Image: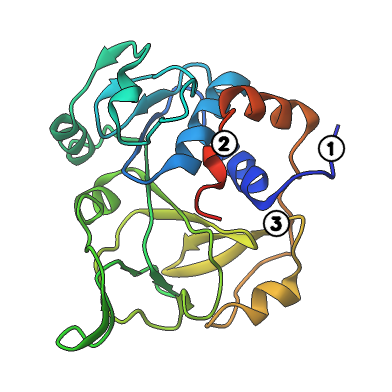
Amino acid sequence: MVNQQYRASDMMTCAIANLLNDGETVFHGVSSHLPMIAMMLAKRLHAPNLVHLNIPGGVNPSSVTQASYSSAGADLFSGAESYFPLEEVFDLSMRGRLDVAFLSGIQFDLHGNINASVVGSYQKPKVRLPGGAGSAVLIPTAKKAIIWRTKHDKRTFVENVDFITTRGNLWKIVTPLCIFQYKAGKLHLDRIQPTSSLEEVKANTGFELSYDEIKYTNAPTEKELSLLKKIDPFDYRSIEF
């Protein structure tokens, strides 16, 4: 049963959870509350054997139970099944054993390039950003990189990024408006979110859309929304909105 009373954060979390498969080994980095909750939701719904890796190293942490919970904090050790440190995650990825890595950025272009370094000229930028950190290693080496971005506008999705921080095995980009898929050397419109439209996606994207057919993401179900309340009682999935 589909529930019409849901928010963009609920919709994106469910959409991301549905991209994950049972048995996959999946990693999320810092400031990654939304994909973290999506991974927990996938494990409860259809992917019980998904392996959840993270920055602190707690493998398969329990659900969010504290108001101080962090996507990169010691809370991820609470109830974790084992310990797998961050340096081993990079090694795992470079050996071709990391199925999915969740990462993000500031600018994305038609050709699948990701910018997390500067806005404007590199020598004299308007804004200097943190840079690639682990994404420069994980995006090229993980089997699939999933990007999430809670802002979808023409400054974010551009014809050419101002600086190429990283590129590689980009698979999907999930936003409040749509899901892009990288194939044949460029971003294609995969699915439109149920609260958006083709016209809205076009109006907020800085490059010409390419798509085979118009498809829509499934709206969150009553079961998904009910589980989200249990998994994420402090609503961490909405922090970025």
| CA neighbours of label 1 inside 10 A, class few (<14), some (14 to 19), many (20+) | few
Mark 3, residue position: 193
Identify the amino acid type marked 3: Gln
Residue drawn at x 45%, y 35% is 36
| CA neighbours of label 2 inside 10 A, class few (<14), some (14 to 19), many (20+) | many
**Looking at the image, residue 154 lies above or below residue 3:** below
Q: Secondary structure at mark 2?
A: helix
Identify the amino acid type marked 1: Val
**Looking at the image, residue 188 lies above or below residue 92:** below
**Looking at the image, residue 240 lies above or below residue 69:** below
Q: Is residue 218 left or right of residue 57?
A: right
Q: Nearer the viewer, residue 224 or 99?
A: 224
Give the numbered dot on residue 208. Answer: none
- The quadrant of the rendering that contains the C terminus is bottom right
Q: Are marks 3 and 2 in contact (CB under 8 Å)?
A: no
Identify the amino acid type marked 2: Ala
Q: Nearer the viewer, residue 76 or 147?
A: 76
- The quadrant of the rendering that contains the N terminus is top right
Mark nearer the N terminus (3 vs 2): 2
Give the numbered dot on residue 2. Answer: 1
Q: Secondary structure at mark 1?
A: loop
Give the numbered dot on residue 17. Answer: 2
Q: Is residue 72 left or right of residue 23?
A: left
The x and y percentages for residue 177 are 65, 63
The x and y percentages for residue 90 are 18, 38
Mark nearer the N terminus (1 vs 3): 1
Q: Secondary structure at mark 3?
A: loop
Mark nearer the N terminus (1 vs 2): 1
Residue drawn at x 14%, y 87% is 123
Judged from this view, the residue extending furthest toward the front is: 67
Q: CA distance from mark 1 to mark 3?
A: 14 Å
Question: Residue 178 sits in which quadrant?
Answer: bottom right
